[in-house]
Image (cartoon, rainbow, N blue to C red):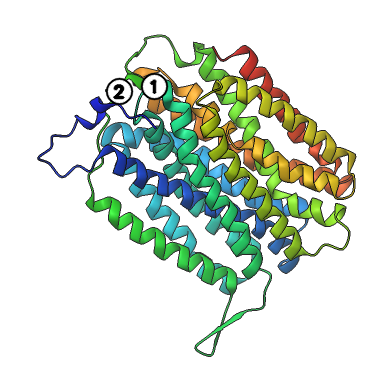
Amino acid sequence: MSYDHNIAAVASPSDKTISVKLAFSMITSLFFLWGFSHGLLDVLNKHFQDSLNVSKAGSGFLQMAYYGAYFIVAMPTGTLMTRMGYKSGVIAGLFLFAVGALLFVPATSAGTFSFFVFALFILACGLGCLETAANLYAAALGAAEDSERRLNFAQSFNGLGVFMGPVIGGSLFFSPDMNIAGNRVDPVMSTYVALSLLVLLLMIAFIFIRLPDIQEKSGYSLSSSSVSLWKKTQFTGAVVAQFFYMAAHVGIASFFINYALDHWSGSSVQLASYLLSAAMLTFMIGRFVSTWLMKYFRPRSMLIAYAMINLGLCLLAVCAIEKVSVIGLVAIFFFLSIMYPCIFAMGVKNLGSQTRRAGSWLVMTLVGGAISPYIMGWVADSSSMALAFLIPAFSFCVIIFYALKCVK
């Protein structure tokens, strides 16, 4: 990864500001945390269907609350960072993340689906803050021409978290209550309490460090313009493309377990969870491998190729071929890997003083993940799970159009 030495020079050697590389490493740890939370969510979807007798469409309210929170908090977070810096967005995000995870304690006692939805909404408000701050900071913390590759590298650790989420969730969430010191403990509650403690420790660390303040001085955002943000097709196209990317990614992940159970004979919920983990492993591998490939291929060209491949794999899922279509769904995640960071970096590149506001809008597009699971669940309940995959297929068509027509 290349870093702009001008950024490091913002802080004088005599102060307590940490190095640019250490700052990038700490920000990258946040990508792992929210990836792990996302991975747990996909297993919770099926867990609540079974434990609380929630329908497929009803379980889509988890994603609606989760990704709807991003829509609500992204713009206020951008305003907060404009006034107080990127660090304020990180701390606010970690605090809300911890509070939401701790709310799983009373939610477990109440035993109602709506309370769990509320807890996840608060947790996701924290993640919305983190994504707005961390994506912009990681993309801007270096040379502009390397922004897509740098953000893909940071997002690779998000892929690691997404992979580990279903592994741990699949092992714990569908097992009987655990016994600790003679007391029965709900595995879902204990998982989120442990996560909240980790997040609180990280929040304390961020409170006491000083991040390098990029202050819009890098080449990444130097070229400010008086032209309206909404007249810049590379940004407006990114808003639409990112919305449909999230609709595709979240929809596929949310119903992966349901699809595997329908089209892999003899499978169990735990086996389907492990297949989802395998899919997330391909997602993580895709991010690391694709970051390396960007040394030789343009991000735009890779985005077009990956979206075309995923369009074909989604149509394979619609065909509902026993086991083959499930393997195709696993492969989809490899080619999903670069889409979010590439679209994000392309959308905010060279926007000058408009960068933070543009980043907030792009994080708001995660609301696409709040809408598609409900629609896919409704199609699955009224027709078939396989037919619901026409929705992500259309989303990949939109991404192909964006990369071909809107990106220079």
- Residue ID at (49%, 46%): 157
Does residue 310 appear left or right of residue 285 in this picture?
right
The residue to which callout 1 is attached is 144
Comparing 87 with 115, the one in front is: 87
Please rate how many residues cluster around mark 1, counting C-alpha atoms within 10 Å: few if below 14, some from 14 to 19, many from 20: many
On residue 218, the disc is 2
Comparing 325 with 63, the one in front is: 325
Total numbered labels placed on residues in the image: 2
* Residue 391 in the image: above or below residue 385: above
Q: Quadrant of the N terminus?
A: top left
Does residue 378 appear left or right of residue 6 in this picture?
right
Please, what is the three-letter code of the amino acid marked with disc 2? Ser
Single out the residue that lies furthest toward the front: 296
N-terminal-most mark, 1 or 2: 1
The picture places residue 2, in percent across and down from the top left corner, at 36, 29
- Residue ID at (42%, 43%): 129
- Residue ID at (35%, 18%): 352
The picture places residue 380, in percent across and down from the top left corner, at 83, 46
